[in-house]
Image: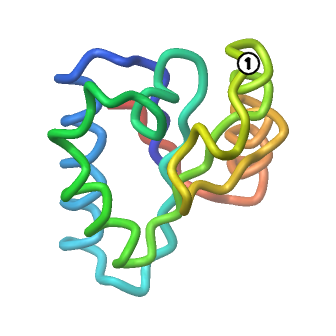
């Protein structure tokens, strides 16, 4: 899983590129989740990230899951219609990261 908690365009670009590189290196059958919370939720909500839309769409088509934090959505008064239509809402982004690590998932925070 790849952790994104920063809205800076260069951080979003790095996370998306790392995700693409991971799939290229390990193969398309590799399960990958991009977990966004806090400011990182911008990858799923912010029009300023439109430059990344094609790359994100390609990753989602390749099977990457975009997990978005419900706690962040609540704090920012966002509804499911405000986020990317393919995003999966998880109750807590940080709890999701911890749970996945206890399940044996690898963790990357670019």
Q: Position of 2 compared to 71: left or right? A: left
Q: Residue at x 70, y 22 (%)?
A: 72
Q: Is residue 33 above or below residue 51?
A: below
Who is closer to the viewer here, 85 or 38? 85
Question: Extreme bottom residue here?
Answer: 29
Who is closer to the viewer here, 42 or 92? 42
Q: Position of 78 compared to 16: left or right? A: right
Question: Extreme right residue here?
Answer: 91
Q: Is residue 13 above or below residue 62?
A: above
User: Percent position (x, y) of residue 99?
Assistant: 79, 46
Q: Residue at x 47, y 40 (%)?
A: 44
User: Percent position (x, y) of residue 106?
Assistant: 53, 53
Q: Position of 59 compared to 70: left or right? A: left
Q: Position of 74 compared to 62: left or right? A: right
Q: Is residue 82 above or below residue 61?
A: above
Q: Residue at x 73, y 18 (%)?
A: 77
Residue for badge 1? 77
Q: Quadrant of residue 55?
A: bottom left
User: Percent position (x, y) of residue 82?
Assistant: 59, 37
**For the C terminus, which image quadrant?**
top left
Q: Is residue 97 above or below residue 41?
A: below
User: Percent position (x, y) of residue 98?
Assistant: 74, 38
**Disc 1 residue crowd, few under 14, some 14–19, many 20+, Cα 10 Å:** few
Q: Residue at x 54, y 35 (%)?
A: 36
Q: Quadrant of residue 7?
A: top left
Q: Quadrant of residue 22?
A: bottom left
């Amino acid at each position: 899983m790849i952790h994104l908690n920063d809205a800076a365009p260069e951080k979003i670009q790095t996370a998306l590129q790392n995700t693409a590189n991971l799939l290229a290196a390990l193969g398309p059958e590799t399960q990958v989740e991009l977990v966004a919370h806090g400011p990182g939720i911008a990858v799923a909500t912010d029009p300023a990230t439109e430059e990344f839309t094609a790359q994100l769409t390609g990753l989602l088509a390749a099977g990457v899951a975009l997990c978005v934090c419900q706690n962040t959505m609540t704090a920012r008064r966002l509804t499911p219609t405000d986020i990317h239509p393919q995003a999966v809402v998880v109750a807590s982004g940080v709890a999701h990261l911890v749970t996945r690590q206890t399940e044996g998932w690898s963790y990357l925070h670019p």
